[in-house]
Each structure stands twice: as structure tokens, then as C-alpha cells.
Image (cartoon, rainbow, N blue to C red):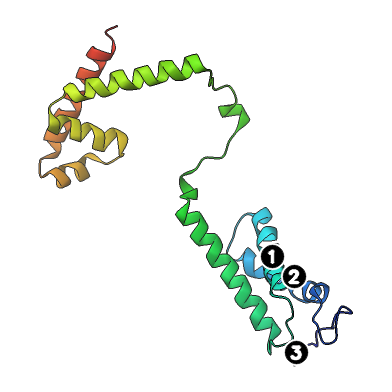
Amino acid sequence: MTKAIPRSSRGPGEVSLDALDARFRASLDRYFSRRVRDRGEIEDLIQEVFLRLARRGSLDDVDKIGGYVFETASSVLTDRLRRKRSRFEADHEAFDGQRHGDVDFSPERVLLGKEALGRATAVLLELPERTRVVFVMRRLEGMRYLDIAARLGISVSAVEKHMTRAMAHLVQRMGEP
């Protein structure tokens, strides 16, 4: 037997959000705690559920209010996961003032960085195409030697030789003024 939800004083037969909060907050907390680790995020998800319920307006036409609340919670969780995936959130690093606070973004520093990048690009373009491709796959895409070898149809030893050649060329040419 389910508990009756008290009706709000705002209108005849209208369900109060305060009553829904009192009845479902602890259950929603447990529901999200099993699926999300960050305590602060759990509170945000619960608030999003109640925000959606408030936006909907009257819940008088809902037969099983508990099922509707948890269906809304499931939708909130799905939207959160979709947002994280589309924004590549796992690839982001949170700003840490201790580690990132002393980075110099002065116009001079930015210009020097752009010039160094342009110089490195020009040096890479001097390499034979296969050596350049191996270097890019390893250093910029983070691929393992075995995967590079498989993708290019060459041996792991050949990949190692291309990387050695590319690194030697970069060190030699980047050291020049």
C-alpha cells in the first residue's frame, strides 16, 4: 500500500513539491548514489528531478507518482551521461591553481609558442612521409608501436627505426636557431 501524497494548498488536487521532496528525496539519494560517485553531483541530480517536476506543473493526472518520479530520475541520469560523453568530459582535467596557476599567457609567450609550433611543423614536414606518419601516430595520437605496425603493415622493428630517425631529426633541427 502506497502512502497518500498530501495535496498542496496552491490548488485543488495539486501535488506539493514539498511533499514529493519529503517522500522521495532519500530514495532518490540512494538511487543516484548507486550510479554516481560525486556527492555534489548527486545533489544536483536530485534538484534537476524536482526542477523537471516543477516545470511539468500539475501531477494530478499521474497514477503512480513514485514510478513517474523515478522515470524522471532515470531520464536526468541518461541526459547527464549523454552530456558528459558529447563533451568528452573524461578527457578534461580540472583546473588546479597549484599546478596551472603559474602558466604565462602573455602575448609574448603566446607568440613564442606559435613560432616554436610553426618551426616544429616545418621540421616534421622535412621527414619522409612514412617516418612522419609513424611519429604522428605515436606522439600525437598516443598509439603503441604494435598498433602502428599493424595499421601500416610494417614490423615493430621498422616502427622503432622510424621513431628513432624522427626523434634524431627533430633534436638536430630544433636545436638550430
Residue sitting at x 24%, y 38% = 137
Location of residue 170 in the rendering, given as x and y in whole percent from the top left corner: 24, 19
- The image shows a total of numbered marks equal to 3
State the residue position of label 1.
46
Residue extending furthest toward the right: 9
On the rendered image, what quadrant is the C terminus found in?
Answer: top left
Q: Which sits earlier in the primary sequence, circle 3 or circle 2? A: 3
* 72 vs 66: above or below: above
Location of residue 138 in the rendering, given as x and y in whole percent from the top left corner: 26, 36
Tell me which amino acid carries mark 2. Answer: Arg
Tell me which amino acid carries mark 3. Answer: Thr
* 90 vs 35: above or below: above
Disc 3 from disc 2: Cα separation: 16 Å
Q: Which sits earlier in the primary sequence, circle 3 or circle 1? A: 3
Residues under numbered marks 2 and 1 in contact, where contact means CB atoms less than 8 Å apart: yes
Location of residue 154 in the rendering, given as x and y in whole percent from the top left corner: 10, 41
Viewer-nearest residue: 15 or 73 = 15
* 30 vs 37: above or below: below
Q: Is residue 141 left or right of residue 105?
A: left
Tell me which amino acid carries mark 1. Answer: Ile
Residue extending furthest toward the bottom: 1
State the residue position of label 3.
2
Disc 2 from disc 1: Cα separation: 7 Å
Q: Which sits earlier in the primary sequence, circle 2 or circle 1? A: 2
Q: Quadrant of residue 58?
A: bottom right
On the rendered image, what quadrant is the N terminus found in?
Answer: bottom right
Assess disc 2: are there few (<14), some (14-19) or many (≥20) residues with their C-alpha within 10 Å of its C-alpha: some
Viewer-nearest residue: 14 or 42 = 14
State the residue position of label 2.
25
